[in-house]
Image (cartoon, helix red, strand yellow):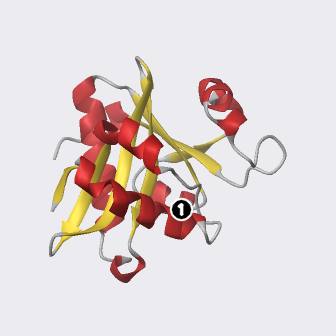
Amino acid sequence: MIEKAKVKDVEAIVNLVNSFAAKGIMLGISKSYTYEHIREYIVVKHNNEVIGCGALKVHWEDIAEIRSLAVDSRHHGNGVGAKIVRYLLREAKELGIKKVFALTMQPNFFKKLGFKEISKDDLPYKIWKDCVNCPKFPGYCDEEAVIIELSNIEEE
């Protein structure tokens, strides 16, 4: 079941994302960051346990980012990640956003959902707003940039 995250979910969100960050698969998040941005997050729960999460961060009037997308490894391959992405894309479309991007180490996952690879140079607002604070910036960013035009998304 997908729902908007609540403050009681912060611990589970941080633990889930940071479990992958510890393996170098994604960037970690702090509790303070997650509390401050809780309204951007959604969670997927199974038996009242958070098994997946994701966030939609609006960068400007026409573009948003999917970030902190994580699914408990026990639930990989069950479509949970795809459900989270589709939910966030619908939310972006409802907000009037035209494009959604992600920085990811799993570009093929996003390509299966209609995203296309682009150069990170095409995302200057992201680079200068967030990436400059990343420990991997500027020399060792191993994430790929993907983007989708929401006008290409069919209504479900």
Residue 112 appears anywhere in the view? no
Kindly indicate the quadrant of the structure image that contains residue 130: top right
| Residue lying at the far right of the rendered structure | 139
Q: How many marks?
A: 1
Give whichever of 74, 152 is nearer the camera: 74
Query: Residue drawn 53% across and 68% down?
Result: 20
Tell me if mark 1 has few (under 14), some (14-19) or many (20+) residues whose alpha carbon lies within 10 angstroms of its own.
some
* Residue 45 coordinates in the image, percent (x, y): 21, 66
Element assignment for label 1: helix
- Identity of the amino acid at label 1? Asn
Residue 38 appears anywhere in the view? yes
Give whichever of 116, 38 is nearer the camera: 38
Kindly indicate the quadrant of the structure image that contains residue 148: top left
* Residue 117 coordinates in the image, percent (x, y): 59, 46
Query: What residue would you read off at disc 1?
Result: 108
Q: Is residue 119 placed above or below 15 in the rendered structure?
A: above
* Residue 123 coordinates in the image, percent (x, y): 62, 30
Query: Residue drawn 39% across and 55% down?
Result: 113
Query: Residue drawn 18% across and 41% down?
Result: 155
